[in-house]
Image (cartoon, grey):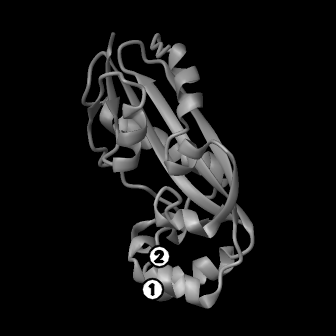
Amino acid sequence: MKKIILASTSPRRKEILEKLKMPFEIQESNYEEDMTLDMTPEKLAEYLSMGKAKAVAGKNENAIIIAADTFVVYKDKLLGKPKSVESAKEMLEMLSGKEHEIITGVAIIDTGTGKVKSFSGFTKVFFEKLTPEIIDAYIKTGEPMDKAGSYAMQEIGALLINRIEGDFFNAMGLPLKRLVEELKDFGVFVL
């Protein structure tokens, strides 16, 4: 089997890919993301993930490169990581009692054959109605400060969520089931 490389230093993506029980390496992609490009969130996520994959692909022969980029989207607005406590509070207030989407763009490149594939995964997240006290208490945990959308659904932020529709792993940063299906086209079979 070809060497598989995850073009990401995200601990979440590493944790998700480890669930497949197949060997892989991690290589950081030094690709410079441009979040200002005029594209739909879905196309932007795929475009940026492809940029990350290509940056790592250029350094590896005969390998399969996997890269991803995840966005929290509310009313066609991308919600990145908060720049301050105030911006985290604003995001959480905006999402309170509402639904939004998490979109993960994924790119796969086979550097041996030149085969390339990109796709997106979607997860709808429905937030509880949050009181100012809950928002303040959650911000005090420090968790929102380095998370897109100001929350982490796989950590204590799960308490803010009423329910989700779609792939949980997509919301964490890598749509595992779809990835496994797409990897079959690259000769990688998990089951």
Q: Position of residue 80 (x, y in %)?
A: 51, 67
Q: Of helix, strand and loop, which one carries label 2? A: loop
* Quadrant (top left/top right/bottom left/bottom right) for the N terminus: top left
Residue 82 numbered mark, or none:
2
Residue 76 appearing in the image = no
Q: Position of residue 71 (x, y in %)?
A: 56, 56
Q: Position of residue 21 (x, y in %)?
A: 37, 24
Please name the residue shown 41% across and 71% down the image. Answer: 143
Please name the residue shown 66% across and 49% down the image. Answer: 123
Q: Nearer the viewer, residue 185 or 153?
A: 153
Q: Are marks 1 and 2 in contact (CB under 8 Å)?
A: yes
Q: Is residue 58 above or below residue 148?
A: above
Please name the residue shown 52% across and 66% down the image. Answer: 157
Please name the residue shown 43% across and 25% down the image. Answer: 109
Q: Position of residue 36 (x, y in %)?
A: 54, 63
Q: Is residue 170 above or below residue 118?
A: below
* C-alpha span from label 1 to label 2: 7 Å
Quadrant in the rendering for residue 145: bottom left
Residue indicated by mark 1: 85
Q: Label 1 sits on what residue type?
A: Val
